[in-house]
Image (spheres, rainbow, N blue to C red):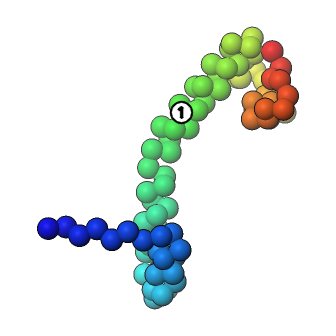
Amino acid sequence: MNATIKLTTEQVIDFIHQMPPKEKRAVLIALAERSSVGQEERMKYAEAQVRQLCVSRGLNWDTMTEEEREDFIDDLVHEDRECNQ
């Protein structure tokens, strides 16, 4: 039989604070390693989506300057103004 304990985020943090420094470090490393799983695939997917959005607006991501890219992304994330089309 497996028992499940439900803890709040605050309880988990409090528990980790009580751990010796070496064990805290192990927890942080384990969490960091897990968070990076699939990161490369997510980045490739996001890049493909941005490139597709550029094409749909008559733009070419590869020929855009860094400033043009930043402006394009800035326009995408701000709902209070329209993207350049």
57 displayed left or right of 25 = right
Marks counted in the figure total 1
Quarter of the image with the N terminus in it: bottom left
Residue 40: give x, y in percent of width and height.
50, 41
Q: Residue at x 51, y 69 (%)?
A: 9
Let me know if residue 22 appears in the view: no
Residue 70 in the image, given as x and y percentages of width and height: 80, 35
Residue 52, image x, y percentages = 63, 19
> Does 2 sit above or below residue 68?
below
43 vs 64, nearest the viewer: 43
Q: Quadrant of the C terminus?
A: top right
Q: Is residue 52 left or right of residue 14?
A: right
The residue under label 1 is: 44
Residue at the location (50% across, 45% down)?
Answer: 39
- Element at label 1: helix
Left or right: 2 in relation to 33: left
Q: Is residue 63 left or right of residue 23?
A: right
